[in-house]
Structure formats: C-alpha cells, structure tokens
Image: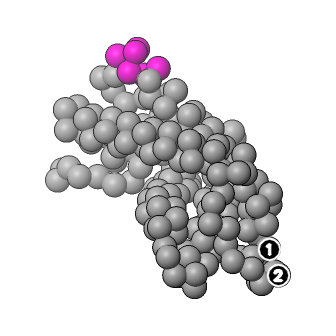
Amino acid sequence: MSLKSTQLQYGRMAQIFHWVSAVLIILMMPLGFLMQGASDEATKLFLYQVHAIVGGAVLFLTLLRVGWRWFEPTPDPPAGLSPMHQLGLKITHILLYVVLLGLAVSGVGLLLISGLGEILSGAVDASIPADFSQFSPRIVHGLTARLYIALLLAHVGGVILHQVTKTDVLKRMGWSLSKA
C-alpha cells in the first residue's frame, strides 16, 4: 500500500490520520460529558487535563490532515452514488473538518479566557470553575460538539448504508469486511 491515494483508495498516510483521529475523537466524547459531571475535584481536574491534551492532539492531527488533503488528491467518490449523494458526501466531509476546527478553537479559547489553562497546567492553585456558561467560547464549544456528533453519526450512517447496500466502501480506508 502506497502512502499516496489512488482514484479508488486513500493512501496509507490518509488512513492513519483518519483512524487515529477517529479513536481520539471517540475518546473525547465521553470525556467531555464525564468531566462536566464529576463531583470530586481531583477526578474533575484529571478528566479536564486528559480532555485538553487529547483535544490538542486532535487539533494537531486535524491540521496535518487538512495539509495532507491540500496536497494529496482524494479518491473518486464510491461507485453507485447519485449526484445528490456525492454532494452530501462532499458537504459532510467539509463540515466534519470545519466543525472540528471550530470545536478545537473554541476549546482553546475557553482554556485561555476562563483561566482553566493555568489551572490544568498547575501554574495556578485554584478549583475548576463550577460554571463555564459565562465564557462565550463555552457556548460555541457546546454547540459545535453537538453538531459534530450529528455530523459524525451521519458520516458513520452513510458508510454503513453504502457498505451494506453497495460495495466494500471501508476498503477505501484500509479496513475491508469482504472475504474476497
């Protein structure tokens, strides 16, 4: 398998970016909700630290992915898609990147504006604020998180639908379910 993509399949580098990002993003979802609900200060601090570190890794990987996509052509759409489905696929992929970058930027903004970054780094000995709603990036972060989850579900649903009804579309990302 080549690092470069072909007309039919993503290259190894794009596949690695995709699957590592997927694992980290899936990890971020429960972390985001668990840290908000944690009542013990030490647990809450730990969960916020992990969320911030993994979020930074997702941002870094996303920037690498965008750069890679800029220089690396993507494969043709899967066979059998109507023009409307092709448009939906393209829009969903673009929105996945845009919303994820918005999510990361709002998370960084929240760290900076709320003082949480200093608390998580240990530079300041203080408790994590009980309410972040007063900080405008919090509103954006919450909305983009939910929007991203909806987009991710649409993406996964589209993959499953195409995988079941059309072809082995997962093979494009290095994970084939066919026995042949």
Q: Is residue 52 above or below residue 110?
A: below
3 vs 49, nearest the viewer: 49
Amino acid under label 2? Ala
Tag 1: amino acid: Glu
Q: Main secondary structure of the magenta part?
A: helix
Q: CA distance from mark 1 to mark 2?
A: 5 Å
Residue 86 position, x and y percent, is 43, 22
| Quarter residue 85 falls in | top left
**Residue 157 placement, left or right of 73:** left
- Residue for badge 1: 118
**Residue 83 sits inside the magenta stretch:** yes
Disc 1 crowd rating (10 Å Cα; few below 14, some 14-19, many 20+) is some
Residue at left offset 40%, top offset 14%: 83
Q: Which residues are magenta?
A: 82-87
Relative depth, front residue between 104 and 63: 104
Q: Residue at x 27, y 34 (%)?
A: 162
Residue 113 visible (yes or no)? yes
**In the rendered image, which residue does mark 2 sit on?**
123
Residue 74 lies, with reference to residue 48, above or below; the image says above
Q: Answer yes or no: is residue 16 visible.
A: no
Task: Residue 171: give x, y in percent of width and height.
Answer: 34, 47
Q: Give the residue at x 50% y 27%.
A: 90
Q: Are marks 1 and 2 in contact (CB under 8 Å)?
A: yes
Describe the element under mark 1 as helix, strand or loop.
helix
Name of the residue lying farthest toward the top = 83
